[in-house]
């Protein structure tokens, strides 16, 4: 059978040139080289270059290359969500069902990305699908208040008691943006304490490097999970402290209870508004990490899975004469508009979704995540692999290679899992969802053990 394409993961350095287009590509250790059928290329430079991973595909056409070409010609950067970028091509999916994704080249993948926690219900959940379908018959873009949004607000209050008054928006990024503005207006101060490797959306991203998209707030940078290093901020004139109870994009690193308690005390002393960004962590406990740790923030932000897979964000805090009173029409301090804040589709999906989440189900999925972490530790110990950091909490898992060639190993791990029909986050993230079972976990662990045996 004819080979339609070959995929190589490389070590060494070099330059390869397409002799048809005369376009050259620089190859570095860990580079991923895709060679479609009929390609004509030559190496113009090479130093220690060799292939350590090869994958071949037969008879599947060129769906990926065609999709990639169209995207490059239309979308700036080839996509509208950088986390989905991949070399040499992104994964292109055309559907999903339960715990599985289906690619444009007709391959099935067991999905352990779960849309970076947004697909907590798996894919194409029938209850959510029915709610969206039913919304079609009632009309949409109504341009008015609906009873459903009040109902959803009541359900959110029930789960997260810190959210006495709630406002909806369209993403977690929006929710955090509004929360910070609310805090600065409430306190009359501008300084906000944030933490290295914190991520509250692309406009509030405090990972490595200078993020040009960050909003121009007056930020003070603290050290996550380090009480001593943050003591200097206890006397700062702060408007807000915003924190993820577990760093998500920053490596799935849970905050200690002592650290969160210190932030609560700091907020009390300084008068700052303590904001818990629970956009990811709210799925790890029925009352969020604030409920798990029994530490109440002044404001909470939500997003991702709460909307049932549709665009959603929410912010909330104390009512009455407290923070969220700034949005009351009688005060007119803050006006927060948005055409789709209460769109019928998202509100309907969110109401169906919130009925699916129970304390028992969260516990079940968390235990599956605990099993993965524990078994990975056992596999690593058995093979004397000590340079893999295993992080996370419950159903959110982080795997970080610590060796000098960690980027190479990370790429190898991602493509090894794809070869075994398993999709994980390229950065070493796994987010389990409600469709996962012990059998799915075992399938992942079997593939992981094979990876360790082959590449340790």
Image (cartoon, rainbow, N blue to C red):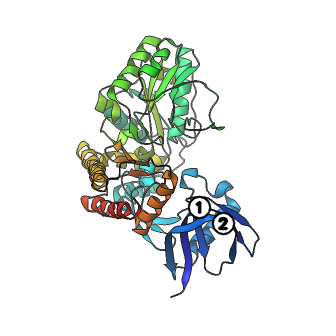
Q: Position of residue 117 (x, y in %)?
A: 41, 48
Q: Which quadrant: the C terminus? A: bottom left
Would you identify the image quadrant in which residue 113 lies?
Answer: bottom left
Distance from disc 2 to disc 1, alpha carbons, whole Å, reads 8 Å
Is the C-beta separation of discs 2 and 1 under 8 Å?
A: yes
Q: Position of residue 266 (x, y in %)?
A: 42, 16
| Residue carrying label 2 | 46
Q: Position of residue 143 (x, y in %)?
A: 55, 42
Q: Residues within 10 Å of mark 1 (few under 14, many from 20)?
A: some
Local SS, label 1: strand
* Disc on res. 314: none
Residue 329 in view of the camera: no
Q: Is residue 116 above or below residue 214?
A: below
Q: Earlier in the sequence, mark 2 or mark 1?
A: 1
Q: Residue at x 48, y 23 (%)?
A: 241
| Residue carrying label 1 | 12
Local SS, label 2: strand
Query: Which one is in front, 148 or 308?
Result: 308
* Left or right, residue 159 beside residue 26: left
Q: Residue at x 39, y 68 (%)?
A: 420
């Amino acid at each position: 059978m004819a080979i339609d394409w070959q995929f190589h993961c490389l070590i060494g350095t070099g330059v390869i040139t397409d002799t048809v287009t005369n376009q050259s590509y620089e190859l570095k250790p860990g580079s991923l080289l895709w060679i479609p059928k009929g390609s004509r290329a030559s190496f113009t430079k090479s130093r220690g270059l060799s292939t350590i991973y090869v994958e071949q595909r037969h008879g599947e056409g060129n769906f990926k290359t065609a999709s990639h070409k169209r995207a490059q010609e239309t979308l700036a950067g080839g996509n509208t969500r950088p986390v989905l970028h991949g070399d040499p091509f992104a994964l292109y999916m055309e559907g999903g069902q339960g715990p599985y994704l289906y690619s444009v080249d007709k391959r099935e993948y067991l999905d352990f990305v779960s849309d970076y926690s947004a697909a907590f219900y798996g894919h194409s959940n029938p209850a959510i699908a029915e709610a969206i379908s039913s919304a079609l018959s009632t009309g949409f873009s109504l341009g008015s208040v609906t009873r459903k949004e009040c109902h959803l607000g009541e359900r959110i209050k029930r789960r997260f008691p810190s959210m006495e008054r709630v406002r909806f928006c369209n993403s977690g990024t929006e929710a955090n943006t509004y929360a910070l503005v609310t805090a600065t207006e409430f306190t009359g101060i501008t300084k906000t304490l944030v933490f290295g490797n914190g991520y509250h959306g692309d406009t509030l991203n405090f990972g490595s490097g200078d993020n040009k998209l960050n909003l121009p707030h007056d930020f003070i940078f603290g050290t996550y999970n380090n009480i001593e290093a943050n003591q200097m901020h206890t006397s700062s004139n702060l408007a807000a402290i915003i924190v993820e109870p577990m760093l998500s994009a920053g490596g799935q690193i849970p905050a200690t209870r002592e650290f969160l308690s210190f932030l609560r005390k700091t907020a009390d002393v300084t008068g700052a508004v303590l904001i818990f960004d629970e956009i990811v962590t709210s799925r790890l406990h029925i009352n969020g990490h604030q409920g798990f740790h029994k530490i109440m923030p002044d404001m909470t932000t939500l997003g991702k899975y709460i909307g049932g897979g549709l665009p959603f964000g929410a912010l909330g805090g104390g009512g009455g004469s407290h923070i969220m009173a700034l949005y009351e029409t009688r005060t007119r301090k803050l006006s927060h508009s948005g055409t789709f804040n209460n769109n019928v589709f998202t509100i309907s999906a969110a109401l169906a979704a919130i009925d699916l989440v129970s304390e028992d189900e969260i516990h079940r999925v968390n235990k599956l995540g605990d099993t993965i972490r524990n078994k990975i530790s056992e596999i690593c110990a058995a093979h004397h692999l000590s340079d893999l950091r295993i992080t996370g909490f419950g159903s959110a898992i982080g795997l970080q290679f610590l060796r000098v060639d960690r980027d190479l190993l990370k790429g190898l791990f991602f493509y090894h899992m794809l070869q075994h029909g398993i999709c994980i986050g390229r950065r070493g993230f796994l987010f389990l969802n409600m469709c996962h079972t012990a059998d799915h976990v075992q399938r992942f662990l079997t593939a992981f053990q094979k990876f360790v045996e082959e590449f340790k």
